Amino acid sequence: MGSYLRPTSLPEALEALGAGLDEGRPRVIVAGATDHFPARVGRVADEDVLDVSALADLRGIRAIDGGWWIPALATWADVIDGNLPPLLDGLRLAAGAVGGRQIQNRGTVVGNLVNASPAADGTPNLLVLDAVVTVASRRGERRIPVRRFVTGNRSTVRAADELVTGLFIPAATGGPTARSTFLKLGSRAYLVISIAMVAALLVVDDARRIVEARVAVGACSPVAQRLAALEGVLAGRAAEPGIGTAVLPDHLMGLTPIDDVRGSAAYRLDAAMTLVRRALEGLVA
Amino acid sequence: MTAWVSFRVNGAQVDVETDPMRRLADVLRDDLGLTGTKIGCNAGDCGACTVRLDGRQVCACLVPVAQAAGTEVLTVEGLGSKGAGPGRASEVAPREFGDLGDLQRAFLDAGAAQCGICTPGMLMAADDLLSRSPNPSEPEILDGLGGVLCRCTGYRKILEAVSAVASRARGPETRGPETRGPGARGPEAEAAPGSAVGTRMAKVDGLERVTGSAIYGADQAPEAFLVVRAVRSPHARARFTLGDMAPLHERFPGLVRVLTAADIPGQNRYGIYATGKDQPALADREVRHRGEAVAALVGDAATIDAIADLDVPIAWEPLRAIPDMEAAAASAAPLLHDHALSNVLVSGRVVRGDVEAALARSAVTAEVTVETTFVEHAYIEPEAGSARRVGDRIELFVSTQTPYMDRDEVALILGIRPDQVRIIPSAVGGGFGGKLDLSVHPLIATAAWLLDRPVRAVWTRPESMAASSKRHPARIRAAAGADADGRLSGLRFHGDFDTGAYASWGPTVANRVPVHAMGPYAIPAVLATTRAIHTNNPPAGAFRGFGVPQAAIAHEALMDDLAAQLGIDALEFRHSNALRSGSITATGQVLRASVGLAACLDALRPHWAEMRAAADVWNAEGASAQRPTRRGVGIGAMWYGVGNTSLTNPSTMEIGIDHDGSVTLYSGAVDIGQGASTVLVQIAADALGVPAATINLVSGDTDRTADAGKSSASRQTFVSGNAARLAGADLRAQLLRLAEAGDQATIALGNGRATVTEAGGPAVTIDLAELAAVPGTDLTAAPVLLGRGFFDPTTTPLDADGQGDPYATYAFGAQVAEVEVDLELGTTRVLRVVAAHDLGRAINPTQVEGQIQGGIAQGLGFALMEAYLPGRTENLHDYLVPTVGDIPPIECLLIEDAEPAGPYGAKGVGEPALVPTAPAILGAIHHATGARITTVPATPDRVRSAIQARNR
């Protein structure tokens, strides 16, 4: 049995993380524990734990200057129940697609990101939202765009003494007209890991022109990816039904899906293309 | 490091000193005795451990107990009107129906609890839902329950129960069930004697399921036991050497013993068949499948938890494994067992007529190749149990479908006589065939026997999935022909079944499939052959249908194809070829009665026509609206021999009256959630002529009941039902003889007296206290009168051509399924199923519907999503079973073509309901898309590529 700390202040938490690193026993961070325990079924768990769930300051999604703040302890249920703007529609849809209600009540948006599964339902949304990850340690604080935060399957730039304190979602770029959506493809209705998923965000001007488009695909590469080429093509186009025809196979060239029990690589690409088209059609409908 | 954690549970304050990172579920169960919270996966995949934490539903297996500090936890034990604080669930849960909460009562009334293992989690999820939204919409209900898996019910009766409570919240006008008085089991409780059969009586074991007080394999208080854990092979085939265990003992002083093959006291070989005892309790130098046990650690729980498999000194030498049947057949393939030449365990064969000539003469012919995968039972209760030595006897408390076979197997392993073994079945949290094999038994029995200390074992989910038996993967080639009038002329079938590393129930599959391979049709020429083939995969054994569901995919695809070629409606084609009373089967058996397939198809016909037409209209609209989805409607038909194939199949039941006038049914038939106990009580009650609610039940204990055979092959209603009827009738005859009364007399029992009354005559009172006790199987009981019933269905052996009467009766059925397929994504959603089943007589329609709906849910999973891949899908998030959102409305049409040999005309329905579902769904996908899928599961990628192949 390892040691366990459940501090109530951020400085204490950061001190514990730093000390753990100093001692050569970096602490495992636990919030909702919905990824922590499943990874330890039938295994001996003797690591030192930092339980951040009592850091009251890290609760509560709120509007802040220039955007929204999703702190480390914000759960999927908080996103679902949060009365958030259309900008965050995609994230809300993802929240309802994570596990079942039990997981949504406990699992956190930040934990999902930090766990860095290629099939993390939150990540494509955070990519299209241009979320900025705030990371703190006793060395200070740094902000990292989400696209640079996750570096691979189960790997991020977070150092062992760092804690992600929250995510900043900038509202300004999108303006009040920004809307997002999310489509998840799985083999059953609930409790399902994505075969492929798409998040999309459009900013449309008064003349129904696309000012800005952002599209990301998850579960089709080690890290969810933005489709920059497609986004370039979409900008300036009319936001009207039929927009899906703008999506071409070349736009998905950067994806590197794998064959696994959920689907073949070829199927994933094919399905991702359909999902991208549908997401865009849904946003302009 | 431990810490004190304080919180409230069901309104009572608790303070626990424990590891702060322990799972809340473990603390509730082990420290607080609240075993109503079940553990199915420890990974948040099944929801069985759902509790409310500060009002919100959470998986208690994913909550570090330290995070519960200062919270309010509500468990199933707190749901009743009295609520309950800590204390063992069996002691504090409501004992009276009147104490039940609304949801619990609704679950009981609706038949929403079958095995009951998911029931507490489902109740807590529903409780959370209704507290947030007292009048939820259907999507809200689905979202609210979506995190809890149920493997038995098909969810429909759960939705019915939750909706009933929600609608009651809307207004008082629908307050029907609440008017029942406390302690009542519903109107049936007051019903007249002799009228239980055919009623929707609530399950006799339902109260403890909706209160969480039923004791399953893992629910005994843990502190009394040492823990046994198997160390399992990570390799499919390997030689191994165990090293010196002394350093391990030194490092872990709490390690009491490491068991190896050399420690098995008796025969280190077990298996269902007397001739096929090929599976070691602990592997001896070589393993044949991933997950095979090579050693067992025995010690206190904390010690065993702290030992990693890698800490145990084992030197592995991986060998070339046989991954599939193709490799097993290769000439250079290693042999798994000396007795299985070419790795073929057993072959099956049924021949009638000249099939080649018949096919050659046919106006139309069709061919099909079918491929299926391993399917996991995925009962939500992993294998669990305990053992203790009592003098020169051993007692096992285990989750099992077959206590008597367990008794005999354990006796062989320990080298003792069967009467030295007592099997006490726990409540069984789902079986479906998987608990017909030994699981924890060999190692807990050996440890308890050698150490003379009580031991227990609870398999983890990955362990359960790696080590338990599976449904056989099949590779089937079949062809059929029909004449121009649409009469089937011949059918040829060959199926290879991957039976894995050990025989298990492989011979049963190889023998049952050829009998059923042509489907429920009269076909003059048939050649059906099968082989069960060994590979280095997990043993494939018994799973609801014993290979028949795989075969049905083939014969039903052929029927669809032939009908289409002839331009005949698919239902009418089946109807005109259906087996009927007087038909001769491919084994030469003349079917004399209770052949209700045509009646099933008649009942389905209006639904079929209406659904096909509606789908065509919807598709025409969809095509013009450029909708990417298409709908389709398919049909599947089946038959299923009830009971063992051409083997003796007996059951004995006893029913006794005590000196105080209480009646007890001693039933060796284990209720695994399917409702056997309820059905047997109903039958025995009517045969005896007393109200069913007055009958007590002793179930399964091999020291207290006679051998009723296994809960398998859909046989308990038919076989043990007959035994129960005969037992009740025997007891009735004894009473009437004592009273010198005629057949029509009524019997009333109570207050130490039996009162027998003939119409218009005086009541004769028998003072039971004055009667001497009579010996029965149950040595702890002293009935003064004991009725016995014995039944063994009449079958004959099959000859070399598979000719004979393998079963005494057959169940028939057909289902129609409507699906919506997304042509671009390949996803399939089942929108509706109508199921017609000829079960002879519905002893309890609620239980029958539950079996049908649950069978359909498993059939849907088999068709669309379930694929077990050793080492890759050993959990319930990679291995997918249907959730509440995947099961459509299911309409059950019960066809009662009475079986003269059945109890009150009943046959069986447990397995039949699963058989036609996948064929109906695959036919519906074909109707929707034009693509015929014959490799299951029909996952989105497979369906999409089949559609693309068609479009090319």
Image: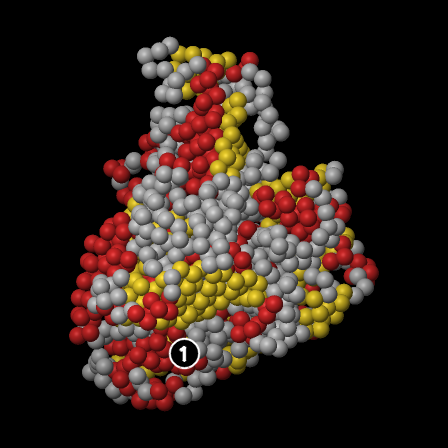
Residue B148 pos. (x, y %): 44, 55
- Name the residue tied to disc 1: A268
Residue that extends furthest to the top in the rendered view of this protein? B762
User: Looking at the image, can residue B571 be seen?
Assistant: no
Residue A202 pos. (x, y %): 30, 79
- Please, what is the three-letter code of the amino acid marked with disc 1? Arg
Which residue is rendered at x = 42% and y = 34% of the image? B683
Which residue is rendered at x = 55% and y = 79% of the image? A157
Q: Quadrant of residue B637?
A: bottom left
**Residue closer to the observer: A59 or A283:** A283
Q: Is residue B170 above or below residue B639?
A: above
In this image, B727 relative to B856: left or right? right
In this image, B400 relative to B914: left or right? right
User: Looking at the image, can residue B167 be seen?
Assistant: yes
Q: Quadrant of residue B397?
A: top right
**Residue closer to the observer: B723 or A77:** B723
Q: Is residue B742 above or below residue B312?
A: above
Chain containing mark 1: A
In this image, A257 relative to B269: left or right? left
Q: Is residue B856 above or below residue B500?
A: above
**Residue closer to the observer: B866 or B42:** B866
Residue B105 pos. (x, y %): 39, 39
